[in-house]
Image (tube, helix red, strand yellow):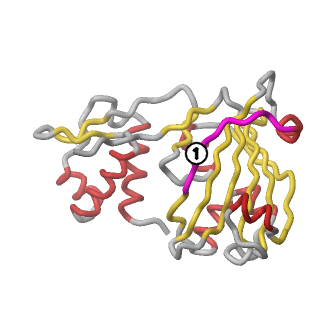
Amino acid sequence: MRSIYYEIFEDLRDRIEEGEFPYQSYIPSESALVEEYECSHNTLRKALNVLRLHGYIQPIHGKGVLVIWQPDVHARFVLGDIESFREACERNGIRAHTSVRSFTQITADKQIAEMTGFAIGDRLYRVERVRHINGAALIYDINYFLASALPELTPDIVEDSVYLYIEETLGMHITTSKRSVSVEHVSVADRMVLDLLDYTMVAVVTSVTFNSDGVHFETTFSRHRPDFFTFHNTAVRGY
C-alpha cells in the first residue's frame, strides 16, 4: 500500500498531465488542497515536494506554486521514480503488451553474482521479457528476482505486472532503486527479439531495487531501441 502523500502526488501529477492545471498556471493554495484531500499540511507538503523533484511544479515566493510541466512527444520513463512498465504506459497513453521469452530458476554463481549484486548461492528467477509498444518490439528486459522474496512467482505474473503482485499480493513496499544508463552495441539476442530497424546501438538501463526492509530483490537490465524513448530526471540546485 502506498503512503497517503504519494497518492496525493500521483493524483496531482495526473491532474497536471491531463491539463486541469496548465503550464504556467498556479495550482490551488495549500489550504485549499489540504481541505480537498483531507490531509495534514505536512502530508501535502511532502506530496508537493515530490512533484517539485519530478519537475512538475516550482514554488514562487509570495505567489504560490507554479506548474512548469510540459507534455513531451516521447514516452517519459522517469529515472527518479520507481514505476512499473504498465504504470508508465498508462500514464503515457501507450498501447502496449508484454511477452515472456523465458522464465527459469537458477542459482547465482560467481559470474551472475558479480553482474547482479546478489550473493553466490542465491536462488533467483531469471526472466526475459519483450515489451511491445504500438505493435513494435522496443524493449528487451532481462530480470533477476530473489526467489525467497517473491515466492510463487509465475510466468503469468511476470507477463502481467511483477510490481502489482509485489505490492498488492505480497504487501511488500518497494522503496529504492539504484539506476545507471549506458549505451551498448546491439547483441545477437537484441537482433533476435527487438524491431531494431537499422540501429546498431541500444540504451541500457540497469536497476538494482530494494524493499522497505533493505532486501535487494531485483536486478534488471532493460535494453531499449534508442529512437523511441527519452529518459527524464529533474535536478534541483540547493542554496
Q: Residue at left 51%, top 62%?
A: 176
Q: Secondary structure at mark 1?
A: helix
Give the vertical position of 5 relative to 149 (above or below). Answer: above
Q: Nearer the viewer, residue 89 or 237?
A: 237
Taking the magenta stretch, the answer to whether it contains residue 203 is no
User: Which percent across, then down, holds residue 25?
Assistant: 26, 32
Residue in the image at 62% along x and 61% along y: 163
Q: Where residue 199 appears, x then y in whole percent? A: 77, 25
Q: Is residue 25 left or right of residue 109?
A: left
Residue situated in front as seen by the camera: 36 or 145: 145
> Furthest residue to the top?
198
Amino acid residing under circle 1: Ala
Percent across and percent down for residue 87 are 58, 49
Q: Quadrant of residue 23?
A: top left
Which residue appears at 30% of the width and 51% of the height? 48
First to last magenta residue range: 178-187
Q: Quadrant of residue 121?
A: bottom right
Q: Is residue 175 left or right of residue 85?
A: left
Which residue does the numbered mark 1 point to in the structure image?
88
Quarter the C terminus occupies: top left
Q: Magenta segment, principal secondary structure?
A: strand
Q: Does residue 11 lie above or below 196 as drawn?
A: below
Residue 197: quarter of image: top right
Residue 233 image offset from top left, x and y in percent? 46, 41
Left or right: where 159 falls relative to 191: left
Residue sitting at x 58%, y 34%: 75
